[in-house]
Amino acid sequence: MKNIFEAAKNHPLFMDTSYDDFEKALDCLLVKEAFYQKNDIIWLVGEPVQFMGLLMSGSVKVTKNDADGTSIIISEVCAPSFLGEIGIFAGLETFPVAVQACENCHVFFLDGSKITSVCTQACQFHKTIYEHLLRSISKKALMLDQKVELLSKRTIREKIFFFFDIQSGTAKKFTSPYNREEMARYLCVNRSALSDELSKMRNEGLIRYRRNEFEIL
């Protein structure tokens, strides 16, 4: 247990949590601890919604297949963050999305039924987790709103510029978390068409780029 505490104590969710409270929280909520390597599948579409993941380190991509079987990237999630909390609180029976490790990941799986019920031990951690969950769900609602707006763009160029706004904020230079194939899947466009449009934008003096590094001119 102490090894787990040492790995977890710097996570925002566990900051200012004593070892005794941490031990009580895990006795109350923890189902298992798991480690994943890059490209490992954490769960697939259609798996039962039983657990909520707490991403301690690493990053994952959330994907879903469209009608013709093409995998679409919904988002990338970086630690520290929750995984699957929307499915738990929405009362879904199965997960509508898949989750895959983008790099080595460390995940705590928490009991979904206990997360959404009143804690019998009245532990402080159970109260704290609700505060973090509320912020997490709010951020993901904003992310999904951005995704809807992105998909509403009519041209590939409009989608690219909107994607740049999301990734760069006010900065002119940024590094995309996606390679070309992944970027095309995130934008829901053909990879060749995306590469052609990026080349046109570079030739027109709108952007510079090298692999995943972009500069908006």
Image (cartoon, rainbow, N blue to C red):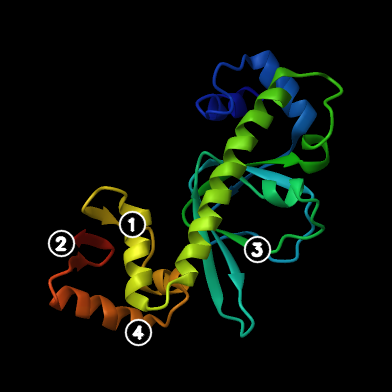
- Mark 2 crowd level (few <14, some 14–19, many ≥20, 10 Å Cα): few
Per the model, the C-alpha gap separating discs 4 and 1 is: 20 Å
> CB of mark 1 within 8 Å of CB of mark 3?
no
The residue that label 1 is drawn on is 165
3D distance between C-alphas at marks 1 and 3: 25 Å
16 shown above or below 89: above
Q: Which residue is mark 3?
A: 97
Q: Nearer the viewer, mark 4 or mark 3?
A: 4
Whether residue 60 is visible, yes or no, is no
Q: Earlier in the sequence, mark 4 or mark 3?
A: 3
Q: Earlier in the sequence, mark 4 or mark 1?
A: 1
Image coordinates of residue 58 in percent, x first then y, are: 48, 46
Expressed as whole percent of the image width and height from the top left, the position of residue 151 reads 49, 70
Whether label 4 touches label 2, CB < 8 Å: no
Amino acid at dot 2: Leu
Where's the N terminus, which quadrant?
A: top right
